[in-house]
């Protein structure tokens, strides 16, 4: 396991060296969203009874930041390593398929949580957020960032060029996270859009995470957790398979 | 009988319809200094990549110290150090960080002493804390060698380690690799510099068009009877070359004649006697033994026919 732990440490050091871009920048972006949306909609919209819009918004923004950064960590690390050729140092080392998967995923989770914590600390200066169940909050934060970490591994291995990666991010990750109930409750959507929203796995991550704060959600929390775990299982299996077969890694 | 350091059997590798390796069989004994030669695109790097696990063979088997590189890859990789042909590096880290991380990948947590020794031997100590990006090409190549050696592998594969480096660095890398060999490492070297193989290697394999066309000790290869080149010069125009020597002509001008002699069939003295008998006024002679390069060119061109 030393090889796995070293790869995890290397991944942490990699994003730590460019913390301005990998940690500070997403925190600032999330805070801008919070300031603009709460300024415009506070007092005009009440999604859950007795919960202000700004309070409602914070868990969604937090989770969106966590999962986007988890994805960005594994995907950007892998495509950079592939493009620069230094992935070779890992490929020739005695690190098993499972260990490679675990190291990249754990680093993605860690970055997601660190950025999320940063957003939370600053948001707490802005408004007090209730905590209904801290365990559920952490459960969803870790499992959801692991899902996106695994998806980032797949994208990082699949993409041959940076513009393919940008397309993956801009046409899949960003729209799915924006349309997952970060800024609204899906009950406020009309028929077809509400139905379509249920096919978006990010909805369950954010809704379950929000349940941990307020004890109320659009979808039963058990269903949300089941969707996240199934997503994690499927994506982990795909990750394992592509790393093990050497798809786009070994000729 | 000791386990071979490298054992390759019936190795095939296809890239689509292109057959890069066509049934390579090769055993390299422990402690050998083995040279793998071949023209561009012959399959050398494919073979090295297959050994390192970077290329999956279509069929056949490869073993490092008896461990299969596919089915027992963890054990095989622990015993192998690979210096890649391309200069690759991680721009996020310093030299020392790169070496410490590489040690960790191989399960070594307290490797600072050996890392310091490698830095010192490869004259990188003063650059230990410099970012990889700031190093010259030659320094980056030395870091690659250090990275391949952090886990003290029994088998070291160097894929054209001196390509594009200056003469001084090349000679210092030769000395370093020779010292590695003396300390018991099995060395597999691919190179374009035939002088390099001639100087360093005990045994040489020549690969061409995906096949191992020659596998001999350097001495055997050098004494294959390919022979020598005899150059005869005169201050006066040379007469016609005797009929029996015409097939040996490599080059002929008004004042100079070059003949290729087969080492075990032709005697320089006899040839000179025949030329004198044909009224050659010889003022100067030169005899040049075939270099590995001549043998290589001849073997690979035979293969191309």
Image (cartoon, grey):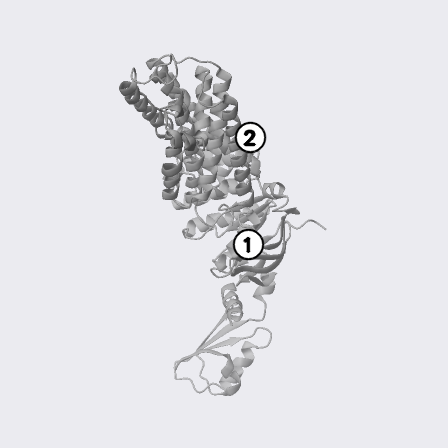
Q: In this view, does B265 lie to the left or right of B127?
A: right
Residue B157 visible in the shown view = yes
| Residue B289: x %, y % from top left | 52, 68
Quadrant hosting residue A41 = top left
Mark 1 lies on residue: B47
The chain carrying label 1 is: B
Q: Residue at x 37, y 34 (%)?
A: A175
Q: Which of marks 2 and 1 is in front?
A: 1
Q: In this view, does A100 lie to the left or right of A181?
A: right
Nearer the observer, A129 or B302: A129
Q: Which residue is drawn at 51% across and 25% down?
A: A223
Classed neighbour count for the residue bearing mark 2: other residues with Cα under 10 Å, few (<14), some (14–19), many (≥20) = some
Mark 2 lies on residue: B109
The reply to whether the C-beta atoms of the residues labelled 2 and 1 are less than 8 Å apart is no
Q: Is residue B7 left or right of residue B91?
A: right
Nearer the observer, B297 or A238: A238
- Sequence-wise first label, 2 or 1: 1
Of the 4 image quadrants, the one containing the N terminus of chain A is: top right
In this rendering, the count of numbered labels is: 2
| Residue A76: x %, y % from top left | 41, 37
| Residue A155: x %, y % from top left | 44, 40
Classed neighbour count for the residue bearing mark 1: other residues with Cα under 10 Å, few (<14), some (14–19), many (≥20) = many
Q: Which residue is drawn at 31% across and 24% down?
A: A33
Q: Establish if B49 lies above or below A132.
A: below
Q: Establish if B54 lies above or below A120.
A: below
Report the Cα–Cα distance between label 2 and label 1: 31 Å
Residue B111 visible in the shown view = no
Residue furthest front in the image: A191
Query: Judging from the image, what secondary structure is the residue with disc 1 in?
Result: helix
Query: Judging from the image, what secondary structure is the residue with disc 2 in?
Result: loop
Q: Establish if B13 lies above or below B222.
A: above
| Residue A243: x %, y % from top left | 53, 41
């Amino acid at each position: 396991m030393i090889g796995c732990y070293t790869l995890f440490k290397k991944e942490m050091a990699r994003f730590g060296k460019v913390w301005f871009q990998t940690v500070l920048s997403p925190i600032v972006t999330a805070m801008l969203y919070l300031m603009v949306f709460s300024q415009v909609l506070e007092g005009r919209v009440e999604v859950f009874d007795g919960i202000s819009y700004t309070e409602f918004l914070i868990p969604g923004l937090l989770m969106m930041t966590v999962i986007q950064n988890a994805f960005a960590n594994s995907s950007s690390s892998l495509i950079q390593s592939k493009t620069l050729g230094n992935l070779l140092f890992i490929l020739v080392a005695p690190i098993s398929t499972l260990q490679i998967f675990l190291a990249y995923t754990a680093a993605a989770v860690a970055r997601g949580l660190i950025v999320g914590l940063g957003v939370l600390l600053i948001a707490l200066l802005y408004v007090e957020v209730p905590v209904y169940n801290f365990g559920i909050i952490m459960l969803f934060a870790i499992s959801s960032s692991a899902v996106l970490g695994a998806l980032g591994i797949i994208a990082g291995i699949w993409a041959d060029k940076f513009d393919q990666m940008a397309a993956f991010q801009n046409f899949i990750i960003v729209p799915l996270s924006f349309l997952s109930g970060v800024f609204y409750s899906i009950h406020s959507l009309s028929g077809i859009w509400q139905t379509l929203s249920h096919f978006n796995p990010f909805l369950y991550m954010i809704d379950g995470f929000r349940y941990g704060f307020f004890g109320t959600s659009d979808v039963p929390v058990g269903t949300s957790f089941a969707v996240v775990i199934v997503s994690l299982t499927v994506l982990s299996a795909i990750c394992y398979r592509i790393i093990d077969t050497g798809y786009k890694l070994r000729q | 009988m000791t386990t071979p350091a490298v054992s390759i059997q019936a190795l095939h590798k296809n890239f689509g319809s292109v057959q890069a390796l066509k049934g390579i069989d090769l055993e390299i004994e422990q402690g050998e200094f083995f040279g793998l030669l071949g023209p561009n695109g012959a399959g050398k790097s494919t073979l090295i990549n297959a050994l390192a696990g970077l290329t999956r063979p279509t069929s056949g088997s490869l073993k490092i110290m008896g461990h299969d590189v596919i089915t027992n890859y963890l054990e095989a990789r622990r015993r192998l150090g690979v210096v890649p042909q391309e200069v690759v590096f991680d721009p996020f880290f310093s030299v020392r960080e790169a070496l410490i991380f590489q040690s960790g990948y191989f399960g070594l947590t307290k490797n600072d002493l050996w890392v310091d020794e490698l830095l010192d031997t490869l004259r990188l100590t003063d650059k230990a804390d410099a970012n990889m990006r700031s190093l010259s090409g030659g320094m980056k190549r030395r870091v690659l060698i250090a990275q391949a050696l952090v886990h003290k592998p029994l088998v070291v594969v160097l894929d054209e380690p001196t390509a594009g480096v200056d003469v001084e660095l090349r000679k210092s890398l030769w000395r370093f690799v020779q010292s590695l060999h003396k300390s018991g490492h099995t060395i597999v070297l691919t190179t374009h510099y035939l002088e390099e193989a001639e100087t360093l290697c005990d045994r040489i394999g020549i690969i061409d068009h995906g096949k191992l066309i020659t596998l001999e000790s350097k001495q055997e290869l050098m004494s294959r009877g390919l022979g020598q080149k005899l150059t005869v010069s005169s201050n006066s125009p040379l007469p016609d070359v005797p009929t029996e020597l015409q097939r040996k002509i490599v080059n002929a001008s008004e004042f100079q004649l070059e003949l290729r002699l087969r080492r075990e069939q032709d005697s320089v003295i006899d040839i000179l006697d025949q030329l004198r008998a044909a009224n050659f006024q010889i003022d100067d002679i030169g005899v040049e033994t075939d270099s590995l390069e001549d043998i290589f060119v001849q073997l690979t061109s035979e293969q191309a026919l």
